[in-house]
Image: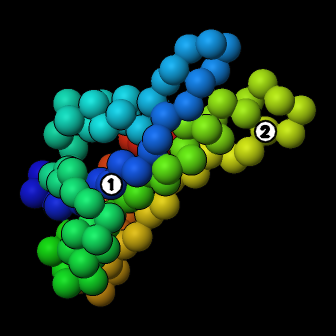
Amino acid sequence: MNLRVGVVNEDRGAELAGHRFHAGKEIINALRNNHRLGWQFVTKAKGMEGVRKGDYFATTVIPEDFSANLATIVRDRPKRAVIHYYENDKRNAIVPKITERGVSTLSA
């Protein structure tokens, strides 16, 4: 499929039970092997510009605290780890549904 979707990884990683992990890198590695959409691994500036200009149908941003928030799962009050999703719904009414489905790969 030739739907270009920007992917930004700003995750800084975290430590859990004495082990360092980087959930953002793991997601990027999984997407590199997933050919459902035309993933474009870019900086946040390029990803946001790509959505604004219509070069990308969407851009997802893995924030810098993504792994750190995941690591709070063992605490009494865990924080929600989120991935931000920005779409250009002006290009085509059906495309947001397709990209949303492809990007759902990130949360699976």
* Residue 41 rendering spot, x and y as whole percentages: 21, 51
Q: Is residue 55 above or below residue 102?
A: below
Q: Quadrant of residue 25?
A: top left
Helix, strand or loop at disc 1? strand
Alpha carbon of mark 2 to alpha carbon of mark 1: how far? 24 Å
Residue at x 31% of width, y 78% of height: 88
Sort mark 2 into few (<14), some (14-19) or many (20+) by Cα contacts within 10 Å. Answer: few
Q: Which amino acid type is marked by label 2?
A: Pro
Horizontal side of 99 relative to 85 (left or right) equals left
In the rendered image, residue 45, in percent from the top left (x then y), is placed at: 28, 71
- Residue found at the far right of this picture: 76
Based on the displayed image, in which of its 4 quarters is residue 5 positioned?
bottom left
Q: Is residue 94 left or right of residue 41?
A: right
User: Could you say which is closer to the camera, residue 10 or residue 73?
Assistant: 10
Rendering colour mode = rainbow
Residue 17, image x and y in percent? 67, 14
Find disc 1 in the rendering and name its residue. Answer: 8
Q: Amino acid at mark 1?
A: Val
Mark yes or no: residue 103 visible: no
Residue 68 position, x and y percent, is 61, 38
Residue nearest the viewer, comparing 63 with 35: 63
* Residue 78, numbered label: 2
Q: Are marks 2 and 1 in contact (CB under 8 Å)?
A: no
| Residue 47 marker | none
Q: Tell how many labels.
A: 2
- The residue shown at (74%, 45%) is 79
Circle nearer the N terminus (2, 1): 1
Query: Is residue 53 toward the left or the right of residue 13 in the image?
Result: left
**3 to 54, vertically: above or below:** above
Residue sitting farthest toward the left: 2
